[in-house]
Each structure stands twice: as structure tokens, then as C-alpha cells.
Amino acid sequence: MRREGSPFQGLSTVFVKELADHISSVRMLMLELLIVFTALAALYEAINSLRQNTAEDPFLLLRLFTIDQAPLPSFVAVLGFLIPLMAIGLGFDAVNGEHNRKTLSRILAQPIYRDALLMGKFLAALATIGISLAALWLLVIGLGLIFLGVPPGSEEIARSLVFLVVAIFYAGVWLSLAMLLSTVFRSAANAALVSLGIWLFLAVLWPMLAPALAQAVAPADPRFALLGLNDPATAVWTQELLRLSPNDLFGEAMLAVLSPTTRALGPVFLDQLRGAVMGAPLPFGESMMIAWPQTVGLVAGTIILFAFSYVLFQRQEVRA
Amino acid sequence: MSEQQIETGSPPRVPVIHARGLTRRYGHTAVVDGIDLDITRGEVFGLLGPNGAGKTTTILMMLGLTEISAGAVNVLGLDPAREPLKVKQRVGYLPDAVGFYDQLTAFENLAYTAKLMGFGRAERAERIEAALTRVGLAGVAATRVATFSRGMRQRLGLAEIIMKRAEIAILDEPTSGLDPQATQEFLGLIGELKAEGVTVLLSSHMLDQVQRICDRVALFRGGKIVLMGAVPQLAVQVLGAGFVVEVEAEGPGIARRLAMIPGVTQVETLAADRFRMTAERDVRPDAARAVVAGDGALRRLSVDEPSLETIYARYFRAQSTGDVRHAA
């Protein structure tokens, strides 16, 4: 039996309302302050370091994103760590919040389908993150202009725009996850706790666990150890396991896009490098090809997690 | 039947909600079990029964908000399972313990609904102001809903229905948790809706409040409608009589004289000078005549309209003693 009427009726209304809610909320303000200050600190160190030892670098602006000066991580690393927090903060009470405020049945009694409500909430949160990231991106470009005094080239702008788009999809994965958990758990606190748990696990614990697991799955051949080399099988396993985490996918994609000299993201045999001019930057298109699988992985993760929450939400009872 | 016929039909008995064998199962338990229902335009219909009897699920099926396991329901000539948007455009729903966005004002909350309904900006403002005035919330239109009391929230929910100009207003437990004064005001507002020709379907477990405003009621129990009709009809059906008249009079042989009045089914002697008669109609004039004719001194004559609560209690007592298997 087919239902009649468009599933997108009311989508723009929900989108505008949710966007206004997010942008005016105290929660969003706190998240933005956190990210802006941390990112500014990372940028400040990067600028200092660049001013002291500026070499002939054709991609000076991109170095702003990637350079890290101990003890601070690079700008991209800071974002890789904090974007999930922002996405979780915007998504963890998307559905259960409506349940708990008892607004869900009242809103769904208006002429809209549930599709529009869920999709509107997702797009509004993603747009909020997109706006913040775009502001941050402009901030980096502006600071680069002021303190480094070098106008960015078109390729640098293109590469940093790719950074912006990939970062938004990276946020999308975490937003979908948070919304999925907000559909599964009726209590917002539970949903927040579980999302944050997954975030900490993938961001902090998984990079330590993956090599250990790889060792267990594919123990290093002692002959490699005797030669002081890493076993390629173990290295491949480590990387494949690491790639289960969206944080790693984001990190790899950013490495390829923002450091034009990156030629490969996995372990490489010496003979594969024969003829390569080490340290020479790749063209934009080639860098994109390297980052493409990771980007697609992030997009796919976003869609799959959203589809799960969509199915769950459609089947959920309206009444508490 | 077409829309025009409904609008202009002179006989009021046009069903706007029509259900046959409506059933909702969760696993093997039927929460709503094959109910038949016809609600006519302009009437106030009460769905009554204890919590968990299937009232809310019935309502949600009418709005297409939960799946129908078997049977069919038809609202304003539309199938809510197939055309929920059209149904929801014309039907207003006030859920049990309605919630609003606390950080928004009363006006903004209604504006969100109005946008979802697809009203333009000017029409929104005009409709919302009119609706808030009707329910007495015009003074707090710009106040955040976080500060509202339970009664004000209920009235805001009703304002939403008024703003939609719904043809059917479905109110789920509208008076639960309200203080007596707020309840009175709210029942008054429902009366106004009825006067405007809006069909009102309300569910409640507070029988005495509902009795006063409902034209007809359906008593739910275990997912089934066990009794349906106007309250006086049900009284005759269940209690065997519609009226209970108490007579306080002194004189010889009064009980015997009262029993001879046509229409009286039973006379109980409560005290030497107090009698309780059950009758099919209001027999007070006859009782007075009978007492005076017998040279008695009439002190008091009172009539109790049958209360829904009595009907309900009596019906289920009869059920549980008479047919234990059925009640289980």
C-alpha cells in the first residue's frame, strides 16, 4: 500500500526551525568557543613556527593547516578530534528530545511525514556545522594573509576547499551516529554517553589497539625483525584496522589533500618508489585520487548510519 | 460521498469517522480489538475507559500515526493509512500531556505549526492571534512557554486546533492533571467548539467530567468497545432504569402507592419516611400527586440523573460476576 503526498512536505520548515534553534542555542555557542580557541592556539603556533623558518615553500598556506609545534597538535588534528564532539553535541537529543518534551506526537499530527522531520533535523545540524567550519576556514585564510603576507594560490584554495567538504562529511558520520543513538535510546543522557564513549574509543583507544590486534592476526615474521624492518603483512593489517575509524579516514584524506607531497597512504615497497622525485608535490587531481577512497568511505558511513536511524524512526511508536 | 454533501447535508447524521473491525496488535496481544465506530458531524463523542484500554491507540490509528493491523477506518472520507497528510490537514490533535518547545514563545510555537500547515505569513499572524484570544492566552503570546502552567499548555494546544480550523478535534485526556477551575474553563472551550460545528472526539478516564459534555460515549475495556450510546440510553440498558427519584414523605402506605405509578420499576424503603424509586422516566410529578392523594406530607423530592460512573461500575460488576471467563 503506497502512501500519498510528498515525504518532503514541511522539510524546509523543519530545517529553518532547527537551524534557528541550533544557532541561537547556548550549547552551540560553547562548542564553537571550544573549537575556535583550540584551533586558534594551534594556528598561532603554526604561524610562529612558519615565520621563524620559512623556506621556499609553494604551499605556505596549506602548511598552516598541517604544521604541528609541540606540545600543540596541528590545526587539522585539532579539528579531527573536535568535529565529532560538535556533531554529537548537535545530534544526541534530536529524536529522544522530541519524545521527552512530548512534542513529537503534536508535530507529527501536522501534515508532514516523519521523513521530513528526521531529514530536516539532520540537514539543519549539518548546515550548522558547515557554517561554523566555513567561518573557521575563512579565519585561517585571513590569518594566513595577515601574518604570512603571502596571497594563497588557486591550488591552495582548491585544496583547502576540499578540506572543508571532507570535514563536513566527517561531521556527517558522527552526526548520523549521534542521531541513530538518539533514536535508539529514549534517554538523552544515555545517547550522549554512548556517543561520547564511541568517540573516545575511536579517537584515543583504537589507534593503540589496532597495532596490537594486527600483531595478533598477522604476527611479525622474525626474519623481518632480524633485518630491523616491519613485516608488511602486519603493517597492512594495522592500517586496515585503523581505517575502520572515521577519524583515521579523515586524517588520511587530509594528509593526501593538504600535503601535496604525499604519494601513498599505505606501506610502500622501495621498488614502487623507483623513479619518483621525492619531495616533489603531486598535482591537485592526483592528490584527490589518493584521498578519494577515504572521502567515499566517510560519505558512505554518513548515508548508512542515517539510513539505520531512518528505518528505526519510521518503525518507532509515537507515544512514549 | 462528496465533500459538498458533508458540508451542506441537512441531516446531521453524516459519519465523519467510520471504523469497522479496527484492530491493532503488538505481537499476539490485541491492544485495540475489532472496534466499530461511527461518529457523526458536529457531535461530542467520548472514548472512555481505564488507562491502557486502547483509547490512545485508536486515536493514533485515525491519524495514521500507527499501523492498522486489521479492519479499516475512514476519516472525512479519507483513509488515514494512505493519505495521512490530507487527514492531518483537516483534523486537529491534542495529545495526552501535550508538549511545546520551551525556549520558544506561545506565538512562535503556533507559528511553527502554522508553517507546517502551509499558511502564508499574514494568514499565520491573523489566525494565531485569533486563536490565542479565543483561549485567553493573547496576553502571554510573547512569553516563553517554559513559564506556562499545565492548564495554559492545554489551552495552547487547543489554540493550535482552533488555528488550524480543524473539522475534527481529537483531544486525548484533555482534563487530566488540571485543577477544577482550569477543567471548567477547558470544558467551556470544548462546548464553544461544538457550537461552531466542530466534531469533537475526546478520550478520558474521568467519567463524571465527560458525562456533562458528551453527546455519546463509548466505553473501552481491554481493547473492545463494551458499551456505546448516549448516557441516558446506557443507563436504561445497564441499570434497567434511567432515573432514580428519592422521596421523603410521611403518610400511610406510601411505598405501595409509589410502586403503582406507571414506569416505576422498583421502590426501596430506606427509612420509615424515605423511599427510593427507580423509573424509566422522570416520575416526580406523579410521585408528588401520589403522596398528596394518599394524604401524606411531602417533605422532599429529588432526582438523581444516572452517573456514568454508576453505569460503568455496575456494568463491570455484572460482567465479572456473571461471566468470569469473559472478564479475564
Image (spheres, coloured by chain):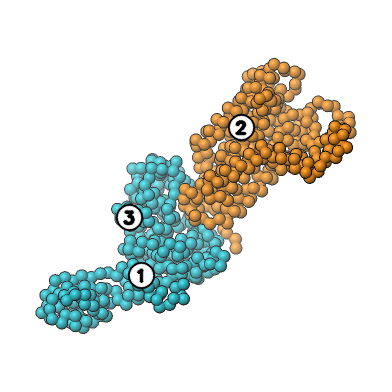
Q: Quadrant of residue B165?
A: bottom left
Q: CA distance from mark 1 to mark 3?
A: 24 Å
Label tally: 3
Colour displayed for chain B in the image of the structure: cyan
Up/down of A263 relative to B114, above or below: above
Q: Which chain does the orange colour mark?
A: A
Q: Considering the numbered disc 2 on the image, is that residue within a helix, a strand or a loop? A: helix
Up/down of A154 relative to A99, above or below: above
Q: Amino acid at mark 1?
A: Ala
Q: Amino acid at mark 2?
A: Ala
Label placed on residue B313 = 1
Q: Amino acid at mark 3?
A: Thr
Q: Earlier in the sequence, mark 1 or mark 3?
A: 3
Q: Considering the numbered disc 1 on the image, is that residue within a helix, a strand or a loop? A: helix
Up/down of A295 relative to B254, above or below: above
Q: Chain of mark 3?
A: B
Q: Considering the numbered disc 3 on the image, is that residue within a helix, a strand or a loop? A: helix
